[in-house]
Amino acid sequence: MKKGIFSTLLISVIILLLAFPIPAFAAETGDVTPSYETFENTNVVDDLTSAGVDLDAYKTKDEVALITFQEFAYSFYSSKMGDFGLYVYIYNPSGKAILTDSKSSITIAVSYDEDGKPDDYEKFSLKVCSRSTGEYSNLFYKFRIVDHISAEGSTIKQRVSKTSSERRYDVSEFELDFGNNTIEAYGVGGTFKFSGYAAGYGKDGETDTSTLKCEVTNLTTIELEIQQTSYIQDPNNSSIKNHNQVTTAYFAVPNSILEEYGKLQKIKATWNEYRTTPIIVTDNTDFYNFLLPLLGVDIGADHQDCDLDYCFGIGRSAGGQYLLFDQAYNMKWKSSQDYNEAITKISWLFDSEGSDVFNYTLPSERIEEYLYSYGGDRSDLLTENVGDDRSVYNLVDFDADEDAFDFTAYEPDVKGLGQLWDYLFKEDQAVLQDVAPIIAISSKDLSGTAESVSERLLVGEADVSDIKTYVANAEANDQTVFLFRFACTEYYSEEVNVYKYENHWSDGVPLNHNFNNIGLMDCAYVAQENVFLGFDIIQLTFNADGVYTVIPVVASPVDIIPSVTPPAEDPFSDALDKTKDWLEALLEKIQELWDKLTAALGSFKENWWKYGLLALAVIVGICAIPYIFRFIIWLIKLPFEALENSYKKKR
């Protein structure tokens, strides 16, 4: 928990700045009452220096800090509110450039309950107005807070205009965009109450002297470090390709907060959601190198003139003498018995890092790195087809009691012998209902195998060890860990049937027309999933016997990208493959034997009678086997029978 980051020095600086309100900032413009446009363009160093801030003293600090939260041009008269704005001055000790066209933001309360306590917060964009250069390069920044209409229907300007006696701004945090997918949050935890007016904006006759004042008090915030996990329901059922996937954020809350404010009732979060285009994972180096230069390249739907070495199909099923695919890439023929839809572009491609591809889970870190290093159009990688009843932009306040969700049941799309196999040996997926979005967990909840914990808590089996460590550390620091299940989406994975052409093409005419003349390789799978970018928790609401308290959160946004797992192995197909391998091995042995016979007996055409005699001998030998066994058994029994007869004679 944080109750503000203001040191005594920082508070005194703020008071000092507010003792020299607008005219002090506007001295360089020559205007007593500068316009919005003029103030927007004043230099941050000039503003701070004219306000008496010792810039060199800040250079000794190593933490990002809010120097001041500044109200500009609030007027007694509504007709003079055109220049009104809010500005923040920030010290950036790293000297790293903050993006001008950025996702930097500040979180401010937008509504209050009947007791005057903030009960809702929103993020507001920060526009860079000025940054320091020269010896202070990128150390000091001036931002304007970009106002917008909030969920309750008004802007900041409209809300504070309702009262002229005091303007209140509750600020929990600000987030700075340093580029390279790095947005970092910094706590403020301050309530700013402004009264009076800057010179030129008060009542008539009171325009020459500033009466602007600001009182700064602490605001309770909670600092969170957001972790992630995802759960795929029924991952070992090979009869389905589309699984339910639960994505979860988890974090720790101090027990002191829970004791004072009650149970965690609501979580307000925001994120942008997308669905990946097909992700290809392979363990075949040649196939990988084939696709690599084609990433992001549209090869078109008509491949008759395309001279590429590989093709692949997805969604294989029997189709007469041919194979039928749902989708296919670079197949050089097209009929109703070949494939339904052509894949014209592949943009995601990964190798399995030396592992068998069907045992390889693609970690979220590799996916995220690929996403932000991709050189092509980002729309190649992500689409807005996120699923029914889902949105790309999300701002949701989840209630632990009211927002439970259900898993949808899948319909196995299996036919023929595969359907019979499933009917005999598999159970249908259980429909999970009333899944709570917010639950507290302890070490006791994590007992048992990783698989059992995964099924019980709906978390990733591979993440159970990390979750156990996280919970143990939290409990050691007197904290409680909460799972926040914020999304249930569709996860798709399936084997890719990769083929290499053994014969190329001549003048666009196929030399071979079916798969009997090209080689099949089981070396790749395809997957698609939803990803959640810029996931950020804004506030937590606690409930103590009906008394609700909203506490804003300080947390850096994270990208939540679930790992990609291979499709489950189909036991029926595996049995067929093993049978095929056994038959092929048997045929190889027969061929080896035949080669030895021809080497010993000569050509069959010229020495057919030798082969006939050999065959007759084999037949006679086979027929004689029972008699040979009987003779061997008689020989074994002979000494025992002789002993028995001798014993009988003696008696």
Image: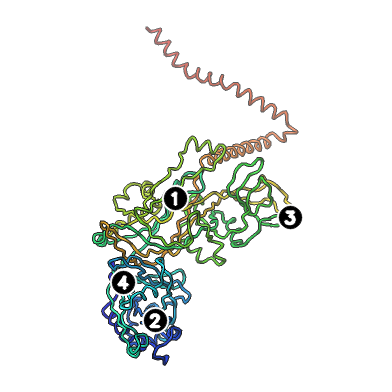
The x, y position of residue 412, in whole percent, is 51, 42
Report the amino acid beneath label 1: Ile
Disc 3 secondary structure class? loop
Residue 169 in which image quadrant: bottom left
Residue 189: numbered disc: 4
Which quadrant is home to the N terminus? bottom left
Residue 232: numbered disc: 1
How far is the residue under mark 1 from the one under mark 3? 44 Å
Which quadrant is home to the C terminus? top left
Report the amino acid beneath label 2: Phe
Q: Residues within 10 Å of mark 4 (few under 14, many from 20)?
A: many
The mark closer to the camera, 3 or 2, is 2
Tell me which label, 3 or 4, sits earlier in the chain: 4
Disc 1 secondary structure class? strand
Residue at which label 3 appears: 508
Report the amino acid beneath label 4: Gly
**From this viewpoint, is residue 424 visible?**
yes
